[in-house]
Image (cartoon, helix red, strand yellow):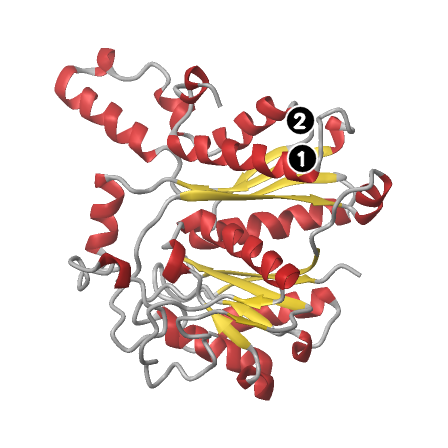
Amino acid sequence: MERKDARKMAVFTQYAVAAAVQAWRDAGLDGKDTPEKTAIMIGNGIGGIEIFEESHKKLLESGPSRMLPMTVPLMIMNEAAGNIAMRLNVHGPAFTNATACASGTDAIGMALDMIRCGRADVVITGGTEAAISEFAMGGFCMLKALSTAYNDTPQKASRPFDKDRDGFVIAEGAGIMILESEEHAKARGARIHAELAGYGASCDAYHLTSPDPEGTGGTLAINRAIADAGIKPQDIAYYNAHGTSTQINDPTETKMVKAAFGEHAKKIKVSSTKAMTGHMIAAAGAVEAIICTLAIKDNFFPATMNLDEAAPDCDLDYVPNKGVSGTINAAASASLGFGGHNGCLIIRRYA
């Protein structure tokens, strides 16, 4: 984007627009193809928090007249979707959803529903987040959610399922994909990467920040996604875990996988790519859905980095430290968010 345009956007919006343009070009769309039937569904958790911080500081120090004139339109969460619509000339519905760390996954799932019910032929969807700021970092630190034991070796700090994990590493970014109905994609000769086959969601209704320790809600989301896709649990070869590297999440998610897949859980390859990307909050699930799509395309299981010795209660095949080749016809990508939000996507090879 041009510098003058970037100045009119908060960082989370810049990420979303940049990723949307990349996805749009990859899809071979030009904006002339039924723009009124092209929709937008973007997940976000915090909005333009750096705008809030800057304007609040000016308010306290110098009064309201010194605040950024565009404070409100820059910081509100829907501006990512709005700016994408303006950049790509899209006139269908443009929505924003917020389910914390499950936002990106849920956005893609709801985009699937929009196509299925005929509200759109094409949906620009995913998640975006820019939450590395004093305010947000302070908040996460007070929750004791961030890793603090590896400040001298930060490359080792994110270590999902490892016995020495101590929290997640926060990250920023966006992941955007283009969903299309099969009929629309085939009619225009689109290059189809994979099929988004199923989506499931649930809420733990248990705690504001901690998942249900038995993983009941997350298991329900996985089961619903598999049923929605019309496949069997045994058809899943790869599970991209939420895998935040926190003490509570990783064993809980291990229970979820065992409960959802039964005996097949021991045969599935599970990995948390957050060990490489960090945790992008609302963008995480969208980026991980893209990773699953590429894993299917390349027949490659991504690794869980920094997994030197698995914790005793984490006893699945987490693909430690080095990715491996193998046939993947279907993959699951799951996300768990503060508030008990659970989402799961099923992606499979397009025949």
Q: Residue at x 54, y 81 (%)?
A: 259
Question: What distance separates the C-alpha of mark 1 from that of mark 2?
Answer: 7 Å
Residue 277 lies left or right of residue 326; in this view the side is left
Task: Pick the residue in front: 31 or 212.
Answer: 31
Give me the disc on residue 182.
none
Where residue 29 sits, quadrant-wise, is top right
Residue 236 found in image quarter:
bottom right
Residue at image point 48% right, 54% down: 102
Q: Say above or below: 277 vs 323.
A: above
Q: Nearer the viewer, residue 300 or 346?
A: 300
Residue 54 image offset from top left, x and y in percent: 24, 26
Residue that label 2 marks = 90
- Secondary structure, mark 2, is loop
In the image, is 119 to the left or to the right of 98? Answer: right
Q: Tags 1 and 2 in contact by the CB under 8 Å rule?
A: yes
Residue 113 appears left or right of 239: right
User: What residue do we see at 19% from left, 20% from top?
Assistant: 58
Q: Is 215 positioned to the left or the right of 176 in the image?
A: left
- Secondary structure category for the residue under label 1: strand
- Can I make out residue 338 in this image? no
First-in-chain label (1 vs 2): 1
Write down the quadrant of residue 200 in the picture.
bottom right
Q: Position of residue 327 (x, y in %)?
A: 65, 72
Given the image, on which type of amino acid does mark 2 rest? Answer: Val
Q: Which residue is mark 1?
A: 39
At label 1, which amino acid type do we have?
Answer: Ala
Q: Position of residue 44 (x, y in %)?
A: 46, 42
Residue 281 versus residue 322 in the image, above or below: above
Q: Quadrant of the C terminus?
A: bottom right
For disc 1, the neighbor class at 10 Å (few under 14, some 14 to 19, many from 20) is many
